Image (cartoon, rainbow, N blue to C red):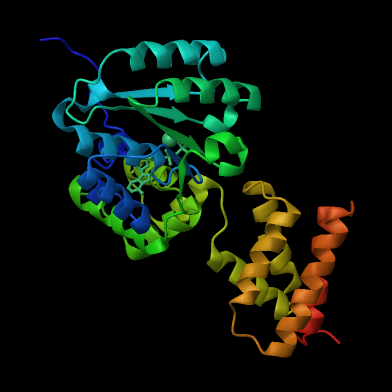
Amino acid sequence: MLSGAPMIDIWIEKYRPKSLDEISGQAEIVEKLKAFVRAREIPHLIFAGPAGTGKTSAALALAAELFGEDWKMSFLELNASNERGIDVIREQVKDFARIRPSNSLGFKIIFMDEADQLTSEAQAALRRTMEMYSETTRFIFSCNYSSQIIPPIQSRTVVLRFRPLSKEDVVKRLKYIAEQEKVDLSDDSAEAIYEASEGDMRKALNIFQAVASSGNTSPSRIFEMVGKTSRKEYEKLLRISLEGLFEDARNELDRMLIQQGMSGIDIIRGLHSAVRSSQIEPRKKAEVIMALGEAEFRIVEGGSDNIQLDALIARLSYIGGRLS
Ligand SMILES: Nc1ncnc2c1ncn2[C@@H]1O[C@H](COP(=O)(O)OP(=O)(O)OP(=O)(O)O)[C@@H](O)[C@H]1O
Ligand SMILES: [Mg+2]
């Protein structure tokens, strides 16, 4: 028997949705795609939205549901940023489009990933190719911003906007995978992964797999891994600053700045969102927000992180009434 390293499943591929029903969130889009499947016809489409929200997955699932088992014969995936120029892309499109569709629907799908990487000239050239083969091909353009797609293409397509996934959707998917993989995942950890992922499911699954394989899925391990400070840490920094515990607050800040490599602006933003959702009395809250605004402005204008953050903590001590 041949020996070798054990195969490691990459979760983002292992748990790529295989059907439209398996796609988390994006409910309106999934409904529309299902309607296309029922009608056995699709328009040209633009899938616009942030990374890791299901654009490629939705295109693959759509093709599988439309064309059935042999869907790969009717689906061509091209990456606008990888290929060597628009002429190569047009040749590939032509070669693929020339062959009659082998399915009963009479068309094939060309999925153009990162379409917003194409220059407007390249897009214009592509549009002419698109027109030439419009009877037997449908294009799906994937991009982050549909505004980067030239108007003549936009006007011939239906734009579907993918959104960052909600906390509920990410946590649910993580719990499902935890169950399948028999890995412990507490509610706090699932939420920590969501927070770090910012609604990007690819990022969420990658973080989860990394901490799971390290054998420690605690929230602190998660934040350590992604170098991110959790809401609880900001709440603590805010609280001890308001309590006038200057040295403690300074130590906490150094930890964030040095060990976690955060910038002064990162910390001010984190404090801002912590104070916005905190229960402190309205007058103090307003004063804290004014102090944060001032510190942010000074740093942006070139003030040093170190001095401005020190000054900020000193200000918070006054606001907290611990210094007078
Ligand atoms: N809506 C979703 N439901 C379930 N899993 C998802 C979803 N979105 C992303 N994923 C997971 O993340 C992986 C990457 O997603 P996908 O390739 O569809 O993202 P994308 O939107 O095309 O991102 P990019 O803009 O980077 O191309 C998938 O294989 C899947 O594991
Ligand atoms: Mg993609």
Q: Nearer the viewer, residue 214 or 284?
A: 284
The x, y position of residue 285, in whole percent, is: 71, 82
> For the point 28% across and 45% down, which residue is it?
36
Q: Quadrant of residue 43?
A: top left
| Residue 177 shows in the view | no
| In the image: residue 270, left or right of residue 137 | right
Please determine whether, in this image, residue 125 is positioned above or below residue 295.
above
Looking at the figure, which quarter contains the N terminus?
top left
Q: Nearer the viewer, residue 1 or 181?
A: 181
The x, y position of residue 78, in whole percent, is: 43, 22
| In the image: residue 277, left or right of residue 31 | right
The x, y position of residue 45, in whole percent, is: 42, 39
> For the point 89% across and 51% down, which residue is it?
302
The x, y position of residue 232, in whole percent, is: 54, 68
| In the image: residue 19, left or right of residue 143 | left
Q: In which quadrant of this rendering is ligand 2 seen? A: top left
> For the point 20% across and 52% down, which residue is it?
179
Q: Nearer the viewer, residue 81 or 94?
A: 94
Looking at the image, how many numbered discs can be counted on the residues? 0
Looking at the figure, which quarter contains the C terminus?
bottom right
Q: Quadrant of residue 6?
A: top left
| In the image: residue 137, left or right of residue 320 | left
Please determine whether, in this image, residue 41 is positioned above or below residue 193.
above
| Residue 92 shows in the view | yes
